[in-house]
Amino acid sequence: MCDNEKKLYACYDNIRKITDFVPKIAIVLGSGLGGFADDIEVVCAVSYKDIVGFPVSTVPSHKGQFVFGYVDYAPVVIMQGRVHYYEGYSMSDVVLPIRLTKLLGADTIILTNASGGINTDFKVGDFMLMTDHISSFVPSPLIGENFESLGVRFPDMSCVYSKELRDIAEKSAVQIGTKLKKGIYIQTSGPNYESPAEVRLYRALGADAVGMSTACEAIAANHAGMKTCAISCITNMACGITDIPLSHHEVEETGELVQPVFRKLLKQMILNISKESL
């Protein structure tokens, strides 16, 4: 067992001393979207700081805790805030929380994020269901010795985002009376926003939205055999598409505005996933 794998299992042992809750669905809440945790029947919350060796989120808007509880009868674990590569963590540490949710019992994961819209058919406040991603601009989280207990050395990536979960997401959107765009997400390292020339490059590569997280998490989840779905909130248009300078304040502000719809969508998705017992 490699050192990073030992670290993962040490975090697991540490959190099991705090709670024995077994989730079936994991949810990662992105910038400005953390309020969903207020909607569940909370069993317990565990701060990342209370898990020995666990990476701690440094983004002010990210609470940095696991919230365990129920959406109706569905047992879930919610990550209120994630860690990012730009915070200075190794990519193995960035995806450690995803792997930990798998060890805790989750076999399905819903990733959410705030992103910049590259596709000019998008507008601020839209939700984009991720159909695929481009992760070539950040290191793979699978570099280094393979975590044999989680997955194979060379995992297939032909369908990272589960077709079944995407169908459920679209069905859920219809049920609550909202619309989902669909598209390809590209992850960059950050923390600086992309330049106009980079946005033109990303558009040429086929990307519809850009952000600083998520694709690496999806790779780790796929490697561990988790069914994965991801939804981006378009909180701003990418650099150069409008004349408005980019700021994290705008990201948080848009996230707050779309919270009511987002929370309804996420709850409906969890209920439908639970009913279909994926």
Image (spheres, rainbow, N blue to C red):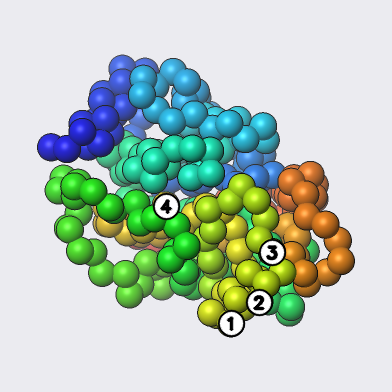
Tally the marks. 4
Q: Nearer the viewer, mark 1 or mark 3?
A: 3
First of labels 2, 4 by sequence position: 2
- Quadrant containing the C terminus is bottom left
Three-letter residue code for mark 2: Arg
Instruction: Assess disc 3: are there few (<14), some (14-19) or many (≥20) residues with their C-alpha within 10 Å of its C-alpha.
Output: few
Which residue is disc 4 drawn over? 217
> Dots 1 and 3: beta carbons under 8 Å?
no
Residue beneath the point at 36% across and 20% down: 52
Task: Kindly state the secondary structure of the residue where label 1 is placed.
Answer: helix
User: Which picture quadrant has residue 32?
Assistant: top right
* Residue 98 position (above or below residue 128): above
Instruction: Assess disc 2: are there few (<14), some (14-19) or many (≥20) residues with their C-alpha within 10 Å of its C-alpha.
Output: some
* Residue 193 position (above or below residue 24): below
- In whole angstroms, how far apart are the C-alphas of marks 3 and 2? 9 Å
User: Which picture quadrant has residue 59?
Assistant: top right
Task: Kindly state the secondary structure of the residue where label 2 is placed.
Answer: helix
- In whole angstroms, how far apart are the C-alphas of marks 1 and 4? 24 Å
Q: Is residue 142 visible?
A: yes
Instruction: Assess disc 4: are there few (<14), some (14-19) or many (≥20) residues with their C-alpha within 10 Å of its C-alpha.
Output: many
Three-letter residue code for mark 1: Ala
Which residue is disc 1 drawn over? 204
- In whole angstroms, how far apart are the C-alphas of marks 2 and 4? 25 Å
First of labels 3, 2 by sequence position: 3
Q: Is residue 277 visible?
A: no
Task: Kindly state the secondary structure of the residue where label 3 is placed.
Answer: loop
* Relative to 244, 16 lies left or right: left
* Relative to 230, 244 lies left or right: right
Three-letter residue code for mark 4: Glu
Which residue is disc 2 drawn over? 200
